[in-house]
Amino acid sequence: MAAAPGPTYLIADTVADRAPDLAIVRRLAGYLRRRRGVAAACVGLVLLSSAAVTAGPWLLGRAIDHGVVAGDRHLLVELALLMLAVQGVSTAAAVGEGILFAILGQGVLHDLRQDLFARVQSLPTPFFDRNPVGRLVTRLTNDIAALGELFAPSVVSVAVDVGVIVAVSVALFFLDSWLAATAFLLFPVLVLVTVYFGHRIRTVFRDVKGRLARINAGLGELIPGMRVVQLFGREQGEGDRFTELNGAYRDAQLRGVRYNAILHPLVQVCAGGTVAALLVLGGWRVHAGVITVGTLVAILTYTQHLFQPVRGLIEKYNLFQTAMASAERIFLLLDEPPEAGWGEGAEGLGGDRPAPTDTAAGVAEGDHGAAALPARLRGEIRFRDVHLTYDGGVTALSGLDFAVAPGEVVALVGPTGAGKSTVASLLLRLFEPTAGTIEVDGRPLTAYPKGFLRRRIGLIGQEVFLFDATLRENLCLFRPVAEARLQEAIRQVGLQEVVARLPDGLEARVGERGGRLSLGERQLIAFVRFLLYDPDILVLDEATASIDRTTERTIQRALEVAAQGRTTLIIAHRLETVRHADRVVVLAAGRKVKEGEPAQLLGG
Ligand SMILES: Nc1ncnc2c1ncn2[C@@H]1O[C@H](COP(=O)(O)OP(=O)(O)OP(=O)(O)O)[C@@H](O)[C@H]1O
Ligand SMILES: [Mg+2]
């Protein structure tokens, strides 16, 4: 489970078939160590209940020999009361175990979920291009739940079972080593069977998890895309695709169930055989006067206590295998390298994305870059021979050169696929250029921590993502913003009519992904967000496409407000929409093909 060198960007749904159990267990133990106190209390309770379970049959044996056979009534009552007391202790311990193990388990799961989410938040853009939402959500929910079964109350008994097996073994050998040896005669068979099936079950459950992730990934895509499916009458096709995934999942589950079904009866056969052998052998030894009847009864009871936990352990071994398969996948995601470049100069860990803070800047303080960082950017942008080939092999930029002076409004125009949005992504360091340099204020982009860049350069993208929250929360992005400032920004952008039209105004919920708002309204929301954020450079990607004349005029005014005093890069398809720009750079196939004033280019 060593961390892969460099970004991998890819979560495998199934993991190579090896058994790194020890490494996984060690990492899980690390999480347990954070909750030492509770873990120690759990161990104490397990010891207590093992001792109680061991005391029971021993007292029973004494009661039979001295109380029943020898006829000591007084002792009989005493021993019976003692057995009752032992039962009381054992019950109390079981209650404590149930609660404490749950606290421990849920704590570990909570920490894991927390770490996973923090990791997901720190991953670079290409990672999300590669990994479907459903797959990630499966890892955060389902895999954690499977791991949770390891700590579920029913599995508390694993620890108790181990304790009981050890304690009972000691007691058995103490009572009669011959019979004890007989009780263990079939153990090697059990171990072999368990190991044989365990390996298979684990493989099957890895498969099960992988297939579940695929179902979730499919649903995660299909449900948001349901409109397209219904509009194009693709229900049958998508239904078939789902049926296939669903069937594969069911088959994988059934394979696992089959192994479990065989395993159980096998244990029972072993238990039955052992008890029969003990009865015969023990009976002979009682006749021969080597042991008492009470001892035989105690030994037979112990043997029952022996196979019960073994059966339990095997059952839990399966859960353990499932949990291991999940843990493996969880750690794989945890090992995904976070986005680098957050505090330049401090390579490795120091360069990783910092823990999220309330300040929007998120600039790592104390690194050498930060000391020299200006409060604001002047806004000079220069692309020098920039190339970018995406992961998939598509070359979006091939030798792009252009510059923007501070305060200038430059339009980037070109056909679809020319690489315009790519320029915006590069400027915000969502991707890194394959070759060439990008400079802002005369310094290469890599000299700025990413947090600083993204704070100082505001992007209004082609798609405006809205959260399923109120309009206010979407405008302020869940930060506290002074009411006057918010109202001012709304007025500047021209969103007040939209707010007035909504039944609950600013407190209206906008629906998942802003489904209840029009495209133009969403664009205006993006402008308000931008003004509240107040960065130094505005990058606007195609805000005016697919919008009516009135909205276009509103957006145009919003743009003028937003562009005031800021270097502005407007990305558009057509020259007509960017007449007001100071200069136009025409892009085609990832290169600059023309440059000049709008009027000049429109005329020529
Ligand atoms: N994340 C990505 N991964 C792989 N390829 C990408 C990615 N984003 C864009 N591309 C590819 O890079 C090329 C340039 O894309 P880009 O989005 O920059 O074009 P654009 O000029 O903004 O187009 P449009 O006008 O349609 O928005 C396209 O061929 C596109 O398929
Ligand atoms: Mg684009």
Image (cartoon, helix red, strand yellow):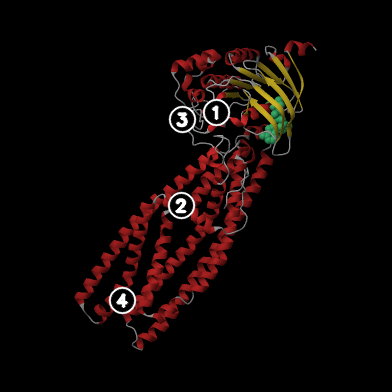
User: Residue visible at 69% across and 21% down?
Assistant: 403
Mark nearer the viewer, 4 or 2:
2
Q: Are marks 4 and 3 in contact (CB under 8 Å)?
A: no
Q: Which residue is mark 4?
A: 61
Estimate the spatial distance between the alpha carbons at disc 2 and disc 1, rounded to whole Å.
34 Å
Q: Which residue is mark 2?
A: 30
User: Residue visible at 48% across and 60% down?
Assistant: 316
The answer to whether residue 433 is left or right of residue 109 is: right
The answer to whether residue 173 is left or right of residue 460 is: left
Residue 497 image position (x, y, % from top left): 53, 14
Q: Earlier in the sequence, mark 4 or mark 2?
A: 2
Q: Which residue is mark 3?
A: 358
Q: Which residue is mark 1?
A: 452
- Mark 1 residue crowding within 10 angstroms, few (<14) / some (14–19) / many (20+): many
User: Residue visible at 34% across and 59% down?
Assistant: 45
What amino acid is labelled 2 in the image?
Gly
What amino acid is labelled 4 in the image?
Gly
What amino acid is labelled 3 in the image?
Asp
Mark nearer the viewer, 4 or 3:
3
Residue 6 image position (x, y, % from top left): 62, 44
Q: Are marks 2 and 3 in contact (CB under 8 Å)?
A: no
